[in-house]
């Protein structure tokens, strides 16, 4: 049994020593490909990015018009890990660009965004100017109090 193990060990070491330059080259190329792939993956930006960077991903993109707050969409997109970009088309009007491969994630993200947007609009307090205006109307609607000024006439002591 011991002789068999030593014979196999010797055979393996002989095979390893016969490693040719061609086999070594192939192994090195395969290793470099893995390293380059990991490096490229690390270089690909994630999340919100510029339109140019999104187009450099070399994938098909889709667009959706978006009205409203981009900050709220940012929060939801981080949750769903979506790669996207905004292109401003007007005041508070944006064009949302995203990867076509992430269409399912974007639709789920937009559903969450719509829920949050509706909730936020219901829960939102009126602006301070409107509240001050209402308070001023309430004060003017009440009858003003009449104040009487009382003075004592003390002229005899002078």
Image: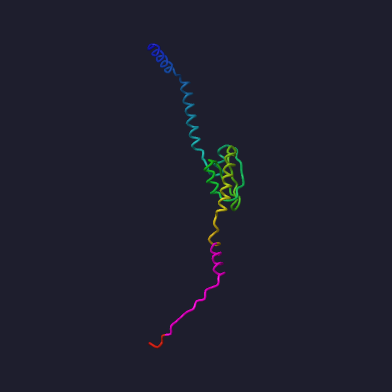
Left or right: where 113 falls relative to 151: right
Q: How is the image coloured?
A: rainbow
- Which of 151/91 is in front? 151
Q: Please determine whether, in this image, residue 14 is positioned above or below residue 90.
A: above
Quarter of the image where one finds residue 15: top left
* The N terminus, quarter of image: top left
Q: Is residue 10 magenta?
A: no
Bounds of the magenta segment: 131-153
Q: Quadrant of residue 126?
A: bottom right
The residue at 54%/65% (across/down) is 135
* Whole-percent x, y for residue 12 in the image: 42, 16
Q: Position of residue 156 (x, y in %)?
A: 40, 88
Q: Is residue 61 above or below residue 91?
A: above
On the rendered image, what quadrant is the C terminus found in? bottom left
State which quadrant residue 53 falls in. top right
**Left or right side of 24 for 50:** right
Residue 144 image point, x, y percent? 54, 73
Total marks drawn?
0
């Amino acid at each position: 049994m011991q002789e068999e193990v030593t014979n196999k060990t010797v055979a393996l070491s002989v095979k390893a020593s016969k490693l040719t330059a061609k086999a070594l080259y192939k192994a090195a190329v395969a290793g470099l490909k893995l390293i380059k792939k990991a490096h490229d993956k690390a270089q690909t930006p994630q999340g919100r990015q510029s339109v140019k960077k999104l187009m450099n991903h070399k994938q098909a993109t889709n667009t959706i018009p978006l009205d409203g707050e981009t900050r709220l969409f940012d929060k939801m997109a981080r949750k769903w890990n979506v790669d996207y970009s905004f292109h401003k088309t007007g005041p508070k009007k944006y064009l949302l660009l995203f990867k076509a491969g992430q269409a399912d994630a974007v639709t789920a993200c937009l559903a969450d965004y719509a829920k949050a947007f509706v909730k936020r609009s219901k829960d939102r307090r009126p602006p301070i100017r409107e509240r001050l205006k209402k308070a001023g109307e309430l004060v003017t609607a009440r009858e003003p109090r009449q104040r009487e000024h009382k003075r004592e006439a003390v002229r005899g002591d002078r």
